[in-house]
Each structure stands twice: as C-alpha cells, then as structure tokens.
Amino acid sequence: MGDVLAGFHAVWEFESDSVLIRYERGIRTPKLFQALGERRIPLSAVEGVTLSPGRRGTVVLRLLPRPGADPLMEAAAGQLKEGSDPYRLVLPAERETLAEYYADELKGLLAESGAGPAERFLVPVPEAPMSFKAYDGKASFDGESVQFRWSWTGASSAKWKAGDQSFPVSELSGVEWRSPEVFEGHLTLVRRSADSAPAVQADQDPASVVFGLGYGPVHESLPFAAAVLAAVRVRGPVPAAPAPSRRDPADIAERIRHLGELHQAGLVTDEEFSYKKAELLAEL
C-alpha cells in the first residue's frame, strides 16, 4: 500500500506486510505513546480492524492484535485506558471515508494472514537496558536478569531483611503487571520455583515492586514488564535434567565378574574393588 494516514497523536504508514506506527511527541500525547516512539506491527500479528465513531466529531480506526502476538498487550492484560491504547488511531470525522478505505484494504490483506492465538510474540518490545523507580525500590533489566534495589523510605521490613534481589530470566516463568492507576499496582516476577507457593502481598514479596504516589508510571513500568516477559518467552522453559538411565542388570553383573577377576589377579586393591563394585550396583 505504502500510504500514510495521520491522526491525533500518531501517524500510520501502511505497507504490504505491516503497519508502521509513529507516535507524536507533545504535551497532549499520552506518555506511553511517547515512550514507545515507533512500532512496526506485522499483519501476521493482527486478526482484525474496526472503524467506529469517536468522541466530539472523531472516528477511530483500530487494529485488533492476535492474542499472544504483542508482549506489551499481554503484560497489560486489558488494563490500559482507551486513550492509551497503542492500536487506536483517532481521526477527524471528515476523514471517515479515507479511514474506511484503509480499513477495507487492511481487511483484504488480513484475510490472507490468518487469525487466532499466536504461537510466539511477533511485535518487538523496547530493548534493554531499562529501569524505573517504584514506590519501594528501583527496578532494572539488562536483558539477562532483573534487579530490585530497595528504597529505605518505602520498602517493607520483609524486603529489607531479604536484601536487594537479582532474578535471572532463566528462573522466571512470567510477569504480573497491575496498573499504577488502580489500587495496589505492582510488578511481580513469577518464578518457576514458586509456581505452587502460596500468594504473598506485593509489599512483602521480594519478587515484587509496588507502585503508587507517582512511582511506577504506566509509560515506564509497562514497557519494562513487556520486555521481561518477551525475554522469558524467548528463553523458554529450563530443560529438566535427564533422569539417569538404568543399566542392564546382566551388563552390571558381567562388569562385576570382570572386576572380581582383576581383584583376584592382584591388579585391583581391596579398597578399589569395594568402591567400584558399590558404584556399579548403584547404577541398577
């Protein structure tokens, strides 16, 4: 397509296999958009497009991302306010006919790309290193591990007792983000070793940082959560150590018989014979 459609706070550039979204920088632009800057959304990450009336003489063109395709939306888990939805383009009502044209064009392209949940993340996330200040500490991510450094003015005694924390991505199974715009906002790292452990309040959990009072804003904490989640999914489950294989009893018996012959011939000491025999029996 190669066309450009400019709306409030963003410009969409339509390409044959993707939509490049460039977000404006300005006082009225949502801070999340400014933090994202630019995003390329592959059409393979989209399952639909809608055009609907907006507020005060506007229309809204919106892409519908496939479940599991965008780590940002997966981390947000439906908590973003309408005005901060990065998949919405708000346009003046007089541009409705043009918006309808692009919506129809996209629908035609999407019919060829399939739908349904994505098997992997398809939309890139901001690159590490990243950091932000929470109410009870500072969170940082270097691409390999997440660090929490507690603040003496906000951290609970339980967190101070546990000390500053470092979580390798390989030890995590997911991320839970609760918007700072609601009560008890927090970022919690879900550890593989704690998947079945009882829940702990975020202010007492060394694997969580707490939001509030201007700390952990959406435009900082959500991209952070998405980047960690994407790294966890890329890394995948830690492979379990293979169980030691059991040896054939006949083979063990033959090796013990041969060891006995060496012992009788004086080529193996009593101590070596006892040790090796016990080692072979342990393989049964």
Image (cartoon, grey):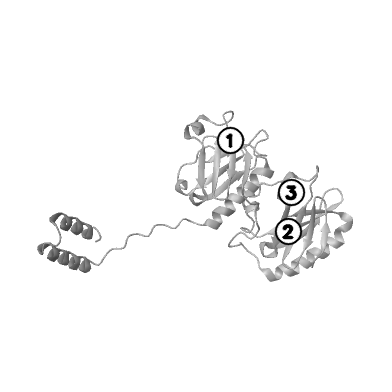
Mark 3 and mark 1: span between their CA atoms?
25 Å
Q: Amino acid at mark 1?
A: Gly
Which of the labelled discs sits on residue 264, or is there none? none
Which of the labelled discs sits on residue 33, or is there none? 3
Q: Earlier in the sequence, mark 2 or mark 1?
A: 2
Residue found 75% across the figure and 59% down from its top: 20
Check disc 3: other Cα within 10 Å, few if <14, some if 14-19, many if 20+. Answer: many
Measured as percent of width and height from the top left, residue 174 is found at 54, 50
Q: Amino acid at mark 3?
A: Phe
Left or right: 20 in relation to 116? right
Q: Give the number of marks.
A: 3
Label 1: which secondary element:
strand
Q: Earlier in the sequence, mark 3 or mark 1?
A: 3
Please name which of the two marks, 2 or 3, marks the residue nearer to the observer. 3
Look at mark 1 in the image and give the residue it sits on: 137
Do residues under tags 2 and 3 come within 8 Å of each other at their CB atoms? no
Look at mark 2 in the image and give the residue it sits on: 63
Measured as percent of width and height from the top left, residue 33 is found at 74, 48
Residue found 85% across the figure and 52% down from its top: 58
* Nearest the eye: 178 or 43: 43
Left or right: 268 in relation to 147? left
- Considering every residue shown, the one lying at the far top of the view is 153
* Nearest the eye: 196 or 219: 219
* Nearest the eye: 54 or 151: 151
Please name which of the two marks, 2 or 1, marks the residue nearer to the observer. 1
Label 2: which secondary element:
strand
Q: Earlier in the sequence, mark 2 or mark 3?
A: 3
- Considering every residue shown, the one lying at the far left of the view is 264
Image quadrant containing the N terminus:
bottom right
Measured as percent of width and height from the top left, residue 246 is found at 28, 63
* Nearest the eye: 269 or 147: 269
Q: Amino acid at mark 2?
A: Leu
